[in-house]
Image (cartoon, rainbow, N blue to C red):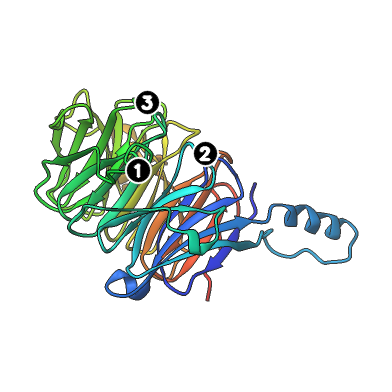
């Protein structure tokens, strides 16, 4: 589907996530005043897919002239308000109407879209001593989620088992600075990766008390991490140093690939669920990018010199396949649909949410 969609929130966007159940449903987390101080909104948006069919019918009947790329409306299905900013969200993998959000007050809040606002949140998990920056719902076990916090810890939760005690199942304490992200492996039910301001990437087995691997991944803070969906040993990290690195955790002494091209910090990295070689990034340089990480940056550097193999002149491929510039402030939220091949969603501090295709027209900035 090559149609684009857009939505504007009154607050600054932080996170966007496609529903794993419905192709037309998207969650968006937003914070007032850039998340520094103020309230938060957790949105659930619905993309009106039938509108495209209606437009095509109208165009075929020549009742409405067609100009520009096709667009689909994004409409608000639900909105939940919080007293503190919301920095991230994740859909439940076992209940189509449930999602969890990461709050600036250190709590994780569980919402049910099928219930009215006065019956939400369903639960509030309160153990962290600082902001929760990301949440990740286990796609394999489906009954647990992780929270990563600026209190330097990661916590494991089961919302059903803890209905009475309301406590976390486990706390992982090994990072020495803010934990910016923790992400479950899509291949192994008990394995997850985490990244931190201490510049490390750590691999964990939640059945153990300590990480199974620690990699000094970047020279500056590491802000994001994701797993390859086809190779259970490949992990991508994004950093303040403006690069993305791909790692094989079986041989962690040297990265598989380094992707250079962003002008500022890489805030999100997402691996394509349909193509092993493709990943996407969102950056503080206000762009979203598409990469083939198996094309080395060394090759792309030779391309800028016009040199081929052996130094001869020639055109060489670049790992940077495409770059979108539809945000007018930091691009901080990014997701890739697991239901529609090539469909992306992004949000930014410009308060805009955009849904678009990696092979379709460029989305336009919302002015």
Q: Mark 3 near mark 1, Cβ–Cβ under 8 Å? A: no
Mark 2 or mark 1: whose residue is earlier in sequence: 1
In the picture of the structure, the residue carrying the numbered disc 1 is 163
Relative to 205, residue 350 above or below? below
Q: Position of residue 1 (x, y in %)?
A: 65, 46
- Residue 19 horizontal/vertical position (percent): 52, 46
Q: Which residue is mark 3?
A: 187
Nearer the camera: disc 2 or disc 1: 1
Position of 154 relative to 106 (above/below): above
Residue 322, position as x, y percentages in the image? 46, 50
Q: Residue at x 16, y 52 (%)?
A: 197
The answer, for residue 257, to whether it is visible in the render is: yes
Q: Is residue 281 left or right of residue 241?
A: right
Crowding around mark 2 (Cα neighbors within 10 Å: few <14, some 14 to 19, many 20+) is some
Q: Nearer the viewer, residue 361 or 84?
A: 84
The label on residue 338 is 2
Query: Do tag 2 and tag 1 residues touch (Cβ < 8 Å)?
Result: no
Q: Residue at x 45, y 70 (%)?
A: 351
């Amino acid at each position: 589907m090559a149609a684009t969609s857009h939505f504007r929130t009154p607050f600054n966007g932080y996170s966007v996530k496609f529903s794993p159940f419905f192709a037309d449903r998207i969650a968006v987390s937003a914070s007032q005043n850039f998340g520094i101080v103020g309230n938060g909104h957790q949105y659930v948006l619905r993309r009106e897919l039938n509108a495209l069919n209606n437009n095509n019918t109208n165009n075929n009947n020549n009742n409405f002239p067609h100009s520009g790329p096709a667009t689909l409306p994004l409409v608000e299905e639900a909105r939940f308000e919080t007293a503190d900013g919301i920095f991230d969200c994740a859909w439940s993998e076992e209940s189509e109407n449930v999602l969890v959000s990461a709050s600036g007050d250190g709590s994780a809040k569980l919402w049910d879209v099928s219930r009215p606002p006065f019956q939400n949140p369903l639960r509030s998990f309160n153990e962290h001593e600082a902001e929760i920056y990301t949440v990740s719902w286990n796609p394999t076990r489906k009954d647990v989620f992780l929270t990563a916090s600026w209190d330097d810890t990661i916590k494991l939760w089961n919302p059903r088992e803890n209905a009475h005690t309301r406590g976390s199942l486990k706390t992982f304490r090994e990072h020495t600075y803010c934990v910016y992200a923790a992400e479950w492996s899509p291949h192994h039910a008990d394995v997850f990766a985490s990244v931190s301001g201490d510049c490390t990437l750590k691999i964990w087995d939640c059945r153990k008390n300590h990480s199974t691997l620690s990699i000094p991944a970047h020279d500056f803070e590491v802000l994001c991490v994701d797993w390859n969906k086809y190779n259970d040993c490949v992990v991508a990290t994004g950093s303040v140093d403006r690069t993305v690195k791909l790692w094989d955790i079986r041989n962690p002494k040297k990265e598989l690939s380094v992707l250079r091209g962003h002008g500022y910090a890489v805030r999100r990295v997402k691996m394509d669920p349909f193509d092993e070689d493709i990943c996407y990034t969102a950056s503080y340089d206000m762009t979203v990018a598409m990469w083939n990480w198996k094309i080395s940056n060394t090759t792309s550097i030779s391309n800028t010199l016009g040199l081929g193999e052996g130094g001869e002149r020639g055109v060489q491929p670049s790992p940077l396949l495409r770059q979108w510039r539809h945000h007018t402030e930091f691009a901080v939220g990014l997701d890739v649909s697991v239901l529609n091949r090539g469909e992306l969603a992004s949000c930014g501090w410009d308060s805009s949410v955009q849904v678009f295709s990696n092979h379709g027209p460029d989305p336009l900035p919302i002015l």
